[in-house]
Image (cartoon, grey):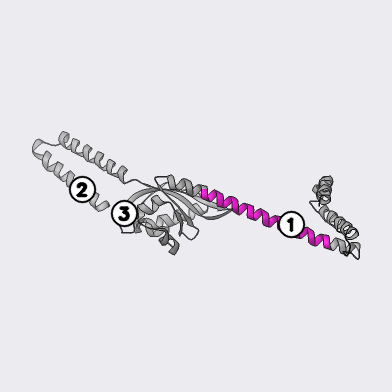
Amino acid sequence: SFLRPLLIVLTLPINILSLGLFTLVINTFIIIMAALAVPGFSISSFWTALLFGIVLYFTQKKSSIAEAEISNLKLIAESRKRFQDLARLLPQMVFEACIEGNFTYSNQFGFDSLGYTQADLDKGLSIFKVLAEKDQEAAKQNFSKVLRSEIVETQEYHLLRKDDSSFPAILYTSTIIQNNIPTGIRGIAVNISQQKKTEREMVLRNDIANAFLNHPDEEVYSVILEIILKAFGSRHGGL
């Protein structure tokens, strides 16, 4: 059991120069030694031992590749678990989607914000279904760019809840790469409703201030009323 590892260590320089093929010679030598030492086990010729060694070499190589793939899958699973554990703590919508554009993951904040559940994702929920119709074409173009790992400027979209109500959000996305192949996208959606509300209030205050400064007294109140009606009408129509 110790002879083969010892031979591999002693012949390491030759093995490196032969790109690992010298392992065939070691395997053949071990098989011949086993035939001499083990009663009932015999090898008819050197070539039979060499053939046996070749089979053993590729069997071991295949086993090593399988072990490496299993180890890689474990690392991916552990990395995904750490990502999801972190995503659960974030007060923003975190999601993943496959290359076809269907959600594969959402944190609980995302479910709560949009009104969907894990069961909806399991049935097949497209990321484009939660976007306002006017934003879908641009979103599809950007989705393709992200899959090609192209730089995409931050985009503002209107997200649709399951009850058909909507809210403005900014999306930050990146490509999911596995084995150097894009397999989907990962992103964060930030609800900017409060920011939009603050912006509207600032515009309203500025317009009212300008009305007082730039209109005669007899026109001020009618102008302010018009500004307020326009602001509230725009707010109602935007949401």
Q: Between disc 1 and disc 3, whose residue precedes? A: 1
Taking the spot 83% from the left edge, 62% from the top edge, the residue there is 52
Viewer-side residue, 41 vs 47 = 41
Q: Position of residue 148 (x, y in %)?
A: 52, 53
Identify residue for label 1: 61
Q: Position of residue 191 (x, y in %)?
A: 35, 47
Q: Residues within 10 Å of mark 1 (few under 14, many from 20)?
A: few
Dot 2 lies on which element?
helix
Q: Is residue 193 above or below residue 46?
A: above
- Residue placed farthest to the left in the image? 218
Q: Between disc 1 and disc 2, whose residue precedes? A: 1
Question: How far apart in space, not on screen, are marks 3 and 2 (Cα)?
Answer: 17 Å
Q: Between disc 3 and disc 2, whose residue precedes? A: 3
Identify residue for label 3: 166
Taking the spot 33% from the left edge, 49% from the top edge, the residue there is 168
71 falls in the magenta region: yes
Q: What amino acid is labelled 3 in the image?
A: Ser
Callout in the foreground (1, 2) = 1
The answer to whether marks 3 and 2 mark residues whose Cβ atoms lie closer than 8 Å is no
Question: How far apart in space, not on screen, are marks 1 and 3 (Cα)?
Answer: 56 Å
Q: Which mark is residue 232?
A: 2
Q: Seen in the image, is 238 located left or right of residue 7?
A: left
Dot 1 lies on which element?
helix
Taking the spot 87% from the left edge, 58% from the top edge, the residue there is 34
Residue range in magenta is 52-81
Quadrant of the rendered image containing residue 37 = bottom right
Is residue 158 visible in the rendered image? The answer is: no
Q: Seen in the image, is 72 located left or right of residue 9?
A: left
Callout in the foreground (3, 2) = 3
Q: Position of residue 106 (x, y in %)?
A: 43, 53
Q: Seen in the image, is 37 located left or right of residue 237?
A: right
Question: How far apart in space, not on screen, are marks 1 and 2 (Cα)?
Answer: 71 Å
